[in-house]
Amino acid sequence: MDDRDRLMVEILRRDARRSIVALARDLNLSRSATQERLAKLCASGAIKGFTIVDGASGAGRLTAYFSINLDTGYSGAQLMPKLEYIPGLTLIHSVTGPIDLIALVEADSMIDIDHCRSMIAAITGVGKISTAVVLDRHRG
């Protein structure tokens, strides 16, 4: 699964009824290339029907929180268009206190979490990013 496949899965996770034309536009691909990728994801079992299967074997996913400090002069609203479609990023909040943003990522592996972190860190305006991987869920 490459970055475009991950992005496709993320878009479909948010809106499983998205049209092929809209999906192709989001991925900057032709309609036929998008349909081919979608068919491969279905054949691999990553997508079954209209349900996204978490993890390669359907097992639970890894979760991590990113604490993000922005460079002076940048706001969360300015960075949202760049953060919005990073694969695995499921939640982003602007917060008060010593950090500017909290982001939640769900991924199949630590490599995917690190990849997401690297994509965020590469965005102009992101100053510092800290990662906390969830070890266990006790409630919620």
Image (spheres, rainbow, N blue to C red):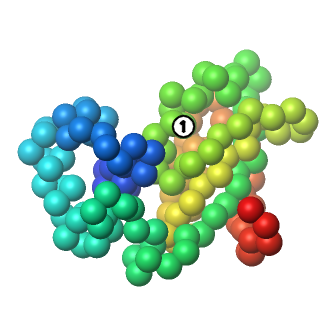
Q: Which residue is mark 1?
A: 83
Residue 99 in sight here? yes
Query: With respect to residue 140, does 8 lie above or below?
Result: above
Asked if 14 appears above or below 9 in the picture, the reply is above
Residue 101, image quadrant: top right
Residue at point 19% right, 56% down?
37
Q: Nearer the viewer, residue 2 or 84?
A: 84
Q: Residue at x 18, y 47 (%)?
A: 34
**Circle 1 residues within 10 Å: few <14, some 14–19, many ≥20:** some
Which residue appears farthest toward the left when viewing the image? 32
Q: Looking at the figure, which quarter contains the N terminus? A: bottom left
The spot of residue 86 in percent (x, y) is 48, 45
Q: Position of residue 54 (x, y in %)?
A: 46, 69
Q: Position of residue 107 (x, y in %)?
A: 53, 64
Quadrant of residue 124 within the rendered picture: top right
83 sits left or right of 36 in the view:
right
Give amino acid for label 1.
Leu
